[in-house]
Image (spheres, rainbow, N blue to C red):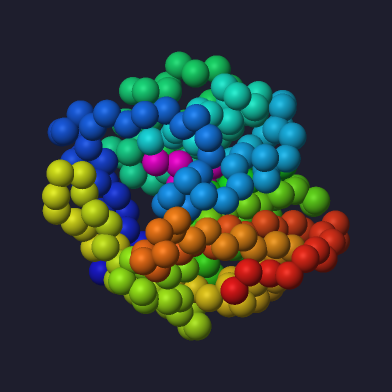
Amino acid sequence: MDAETTNSRAWTAYGSHHLERATAVPEVDRFTWGFRPTGPGAEVLGDLAGRRVLDLGSGLGRHAAHLVREHGALVDAVDASPTQHRRATARYGRLPGLTLVLADAVDHLERAAPYEVIYSVHGLAYIDPHRLLPALAAALRPGGRLVFSVLHTTSDGRGPSTTVAPRPEILPLAGGGRLTVRMWVLAPDVWESLLGDHGLVVHRIDVLDAPEESDPLSCRLFHVRHRDLSRASGPRGA
């Protein structure tokens, strides 16, 4: 079974688990890109009022709903899991300005009109970048903004890979149990090279560490623009 099929089945099982439990999940009151409430919030996406925005791997849709309600964005929230889509539709299906889409990310990117902003909270690492990034670059308007967070170091201290290959990771379930997924957990310079191959330039990387010094869990937040309108900025995170 290939990595993306493994991930699709895992996230469908994840959604089923929460549907069966009727898991109560609070609304987003502040954008959180990592696994802990550290780092920047939605402000890194710029002024979103009236802009076409894509949430890639939107899950329950809480972040997308927050941007619609609090920032006036017009958001397409795309997820490939039918059970996650069912959860999102039950909760936000009637929210004006939010369109919930059940689709493969690449299929959607290849069909959709270009977006001014594309973002993903942990979603990119579940899709083969060689398949995803060409479609993503084509779906982002020139000068558009791509912002995404990805796992960097796991809670057991395992750091990112230097080769473009998926590896097994654990997806915990509320109430106990876990699922196995396969993720592209890549070093920042590897992500930067892959993005650059498709005309996308990284101009900043934020380090999102767990607040507890004893916890090695860490993510990276990438700020990306098209090459022709990007500008270099300060030092990148490692």
> Hey, which residue is sitting farthest front in the picture?
213
- Specify whether residue 57 is painted magenta: yes
11 or 212, nearer to the observer: 212
Q: Position of residue 136 (x, y in %)?
A: 61, 55
* Residue span colored magenta: 55-59
Location of the N terminus (image quadrant):
bottom left
Left or right relative to 143: residue 217: left
How many callouts does the rendering have? 0
Check the image and report above or below for 117 versus 220: above
Magenta region, mostly helix, strand or loop?
A: loop
Location of residue 114 in the rendering, given as x and y in whole percent from the top left corner: 69, 43
The answer to whether residue 183 of the structure is visible from this angle is no
Q: Does 206 sit left or right of 225 as displayed?
A: left
What residue is shown at x 68% (from left), y 69% (from top)?
236
Q: Is residue 145 magenta?
A: no
Residue at 29% across, 50% down: 11
